[in-house]
Image (tube, rainbow, N blue to C red):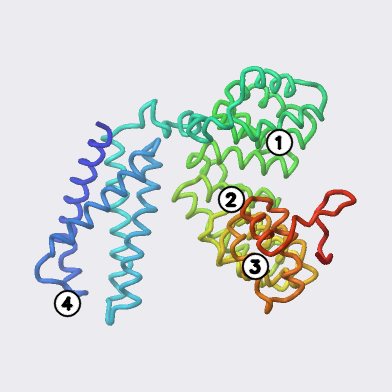
Amino acid sequence: MRILKATVTVTLSFLVLDLLWLGVVGSNIYDETLGPLRAKEVVWAAAGLFYAQYVAVIVGFAVLPAVSLAQAAKRGLGIGWLAYATYELTNWAVITDWPAVLVPIDIAWGLVLTTSCAVAGRFVAGPPSDRDASAGFKNVAAPSPDAMTGTANRVSSQALEALIVDLASDDPDRIRKGLELAQRVHASGLDKPLTAILERPEPNLRKLALKALGHQGAWKALSKIHTCVQDPVAEVRAAAVEAFCAIGREKAIDVCSNLLDDGSPRVREATIAGFIQHGGLVGMLRAIEPLNQLLESENPDDRVSAARVLCAIRVQSFHPQVLRLLADENPKVVKAALEAAGAMKTLELFPSVIYRMSLRDYTDDAVRALVAMGDEAVPLLAKVIANPREEASVRAQIPRILSQIGTPLAASVLESNGLDFPVDQADGRAPESGQEF
């Protein structure tokens, strides 16, 4: 019923407002600016297709997930900007004599129209139901563990009791081991002991507890997590931002926006990454400019920060930015970009990583990146090792990489080339870079 209310409201609002604008209020504007470019008759089939898909986008991405009218307005504003700015700027760029004066007018109308329809739809449809995973902080932040991770990460009742005992221990090392486990499983009953650790004096334990709370989706701990955003230790503040964004999602944007200017690079990185990963369209729009500033900065430390953000978000469509950083003249930036390439696992980065492996200063970093890519990299690694025209120093590293990937696919490539897993007989480790096989 809520979807029906939203769809009907947005459809009627859009049709009435847009037809009023095009047919009455703005009709003379379009006649004067477009002239012969304006069709004498509307192609209603095309118009109908646009209205249908645009209404669906507004309902699905602006109305139904919004926990407030303000959030619906922000989402509508973002959708309106993307749609109408794309249309107008593209026309201005490629159509001869497209009137420049129409560009800001039509974009402004798109913003007003889409935002108005989103707010109207949210007002009539009402807030998400209690069963909706978008219902306020509580339900935005509390997806079921099964839905997030499946049953493979669930723990037995006995294991859960043992984990809770470890978390409540006075032994920091025992607590640390419990926190590491809590980041890998989902279980009810962990919120309270994890929150209690936030009061401990050890910054590393507070940081790990925050990561575990974010992993658990502990919406009941949001206020306590928000308190940790003011922690004097930068690493703890960064972990608090990560957890707050993971749980609060779009709600976290307004609360954490000031941290984009935090004095700690680590906190700024966590905020940008959190907005992109969890903030939806609005979060992406808010984070892109700070990320671009880091990429464009003349300070290599800022470019390292950009690489760390790209490593954290692991969004493959950002691979051109990683390629750019891989070509940086600063070794720190290149090493950080190699780590991001490994995390991103996109084959568009493979040639650049292979090239860096031939340079002694980057060999180990490139090896780690290729190992992190896992089976995705194995077919290309097989081509490299089989190609005698590749540099010998590069080919010599491939068995080491395949052995560390350690999957059946990697083993089959080694076997097809007449190689076993290259393991040092003395200590069972894979050889270091520079050793021959």
Task: Look at the numbered disc 3 and give the secondary structure of its residue.
Answer: helix
Within 10 angstroms of label 4, few (less than 14), some, or many (20 or more) residues?
few
Q: CA distance from mark 3 to mark 1?
A: 30 Å
Task: Look at the numbered disc 2 and give the secondary structure of its residue.
Answer: helix
- Give the residue type at disc 3: Leu
Q: CA distance from mark 4 to mark 3?
A: 47 Å
Quadrant in the picture for the C terminus? bottom right
Q: Which mark is residue 235?
A: none
Q: Residue furthest right?
A: 426
The residue pinned by badge 2 equals 273
Quadrant in the picture for the N terminus? top left
Chain-order first, disc 1 or disc 2: 1
The residue pinned by badge 1 equals 208
Give how far across and how far down residue 315 sits, in percent.
54, 55
Give how far across and how far down residue 342 sits, in percent.
64, 57
Q: Residue furthest left?
A: 41
- Front: mark 4 or 1: 1
Chain-order first, disc 3 or disc 2: 2
Chain-order first, disc 4 or disc 3: 4
Q: Which mark is residue 35?
A: 4
Q: Residue furthest bottom?
A: 96
- Front: mark 3 or 2: 3
Task: Look at the numbered disc 1 and give the secondary structure of its residue.
Answer: helix
- Give the residue type at disc 4: Gly
- Give the residue type at disc 1: Leu
Quarter-wise, where is residue 166 in the image? top right
Give how far across and how far down residue 259 sits, in percent.
61, 47
Give the residue at x 73% y 24%. 167
Give the residue at x 66% y 67%. 353
